[in-house]
Amino acid sequence: MEFWCYGSGSTSFLLLSMLLSTAVAASPVASSKDIQAYNSYDSLPRLISPVGSVVRSVVIPGWGQIHARNYVSGSFSFLATTGLLVGGLVSHRSFRQIYDNEYAPVAKVNSKSPAALSIYGSVNQVYKIRQFFLLTAAGVWAYSIVDSYVAANLRNAKSKSQVLLRDATKIEKLSLEIKPDRISFRTQLEF
């Protein structure tokens, strides 16, 4: 739809004002179906709380990432942390078994004997493996916490940009052209 006005500057401004107010008054009233579609969660994406994602990842590694819809990273964080904690538990049991059953009885007699030092070497290796598993699990868990915060913010930015693009396409349908001899206003109405 296109409107043309001819006349002086003040007359054109007055006519344009009247035209815009008439267009607003004559615009179609949105039906309840349109209002429901606009208010639905599909048309307006739900924003994700970064703090909520962090709290979820503190409780269970990867949960905050999954909440932020970063499923691959969340699954990796959960499985890696769980696997590393299980590895740490198994190596801790092995460490306690070797220490209590083999090293402690020999070390009580003489902690500097060659047999005690040999057993201490194997106990120390198992202890280092246990520490590796537990510290790596803590690192993956910390990564999960930080990544859940970042993933929530990125998801929110993406959602906001989609809304912005949708609104920009609606605004692009409006045009106003002011020339010395005429004023034109165009809009595309959707019913």
Image: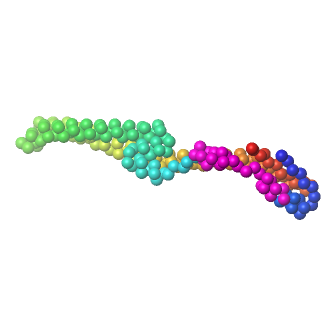
Tell me which residue sits at (25%, 37%) in the image: 91
The percent position of residue 44, horizontal first and vertical second, equals 60, 47
- Magenta span: 18-44
The coloring applied to the image is rainbow
State the residue in front, 110 or 4.
4
Tell me which residue sits at (46%, 49%) in the image: 53
The percent position of residue 116, horizontal first and vertical second, equals 12, 39
Quick check: 25 above or below 86? Answer: below
State the residue in front, 177 or 17.
17
Q: Quadrant of the C terminus?
A: top right
Q: Residue furthest front?
A: 32
Q: Does residue 141 appear left or right of residue 187 in this picture?
A: left
Can the viewer see residue 20? no
State the residue in front, 101 or 55.
55
Q: Does residue 131 appear left or right of residue 177 in this picture?
A: left
Tell me which residue sits at (9%, 40%) in the image: 105
Can the viewer see residue 102? yes
Say how many tags the image has.
Answer: 0
The part of the image, by quadrant, that contains residue 130 is top left
The percent position of residue 56, horizontal first and vertical second, equals 42, 48
Tell me which residue sits at (84%, 59%) in the image: 18
Asked if residue 35 lies in the magenta stretch, the reply is yes
Q: Residue furthest left?
A: 109
Asked if residue 5 lies in the magenta stretch, the reply is no
Q: Does residue 121 appear left or right of residue 26 in this picture?
A: left
